[in-house]
Image: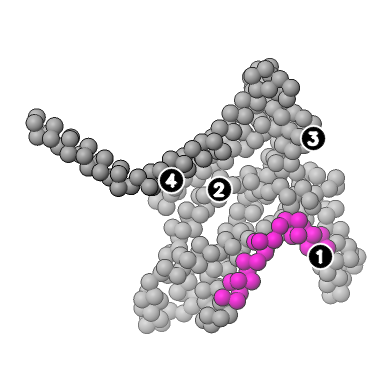
Amino acid sequence: MAQEQVKVVKDKRITWKEVKRQKFLLIVSFFMVVYGTIFYYWPLTGWIMAFQNYKPNRGLLGSKFVGLAKFQFLFEDATFIQVVRNTLAMGVINLATSTFMAILFAILLNEIKSTIAKKTVQTISYLPHFLSWIIVTGILHDALSSSGIINELLLKYGFIDQAINFFAHKEYFWPIVAFANCWKETGWNAIIYLAAITAIDPCLYEAASIDGAGRWAKIKYITLPSIRPTIMILLLMNVGNVLNAGFEIQYLLGNGLIKSVSDTIDIYVLTWGISNNDFSLGTAAGMFKSAVSIALIVIANYAAKRMGEERLF
């Protein structure tokens, strides 16, 4: 019994000694916790609006409590169901195409032997990431307009008889959004995959060369299996962003003719929450989006666990 008490006292001394040694990190951590609480968690009290008929002049405490009435309105609103479909579809398309293109680009870039050429291509590929969506949508609008370069090329080589108004046909909008995301983010998204490829032991490639493996065999049997854990972790993290399909590009390129396929949950929240001053409905839609995102991450993580793949938790 006495030995146990001595051990407890000794452990406490070690703990306080460690606290004193790490006091600078603890102080910094304290300020970060305070910062996170104030700017990340305290604003979540505004979710109370989703259960109220919120009136700005009455505030959170004075507004009438209406329970789940706002959520009931959402799920009975055909427009909301439509924007959920659009958001989910564009989110899945963006996730699939951006992940595939980033992996493909990283592998192809890794195959370039010239260091100067590799760095040049890599630097150029990063540049679109730093362009605002205003600039990107402006480029897209000019390129895809009736007198744009795309229509000129299609007319010149006889693929079409007359110019196509790409922004007047619903079937073109989702591919345009996917292309814009790929063009803007592929180079940036490939950074992590390039880092993972760089970490692969060169001896594996040397051994494969001795065995007569070509470039495709090395990619198939060494590169892809080696970066598979990285692919799975990033995929799981990005699954939660499926409903973050975007706002700027859909809002800037959308119009009345393609509204049924261009509107997203974020645009719906803007329309109801700000334009129509129904803050409660906008908050309810935002809560629904957050809840679905969390559910998607949990489900994807569970599926990865069942399949024996890398997982987040």
Tag of residue 143: 1
Task: Give the alpha-carbon distance from disc 3 to disc 2, as whole Å.
Answer: 30 Å
Task: Give the alpha-carbon distance from disc 1 to disc 4, as whole Å.
Answer: 50 Å
Give the label, 4 or 3, closer to the camera. 4
Main SS of residues in magenta? helix
Say whether disc 3 or disc 1 marks the residue closer to the N-terminus.
1
Tag of residue 120: none
Using residue 213 as the reference point, say whether residue 71 is left or right of it: right
| Classed neighbour count for the residue bearing mark 4: other residues with Cα under 10 Å, few (<14), some (14–19), many (≥20) | few
- Is residue 230 among what the camera can see? yes
Residue under the image location 46 percent in, 68 percent down? 197
| Classed neighbour count for the residue bearing mark 3: other residues with Cα under 10 Å, few (<14), some (14–19), many (≥20) | few
Say if the magenta span includes residue 138: yes
Q: Mark 2 points at which residue?
A: 239
Q: In which quarter of the image is residue 222?
A: bottom left
Q: Name the residue under label 3.
A: 275
Measured as percent of width and height from the top left, residue 176 is found at: 74, 57
Task: Give the alpha-carbon distance from disc 1 to disc 2, as whole Å.
Answer: 31 Å
**Range shown magenta:** 119-144
Q: In what element is the residue under mark 1? A: helix
Q: In which quarter of the image is residue 124?
A: bottom right
Say whether disc 3 or disc 2 marks the residue closer to the N-terminus.
2
Q: Mark 1: which amino acid? A: Ala
* 139 w.r.t. 59: above or below: below
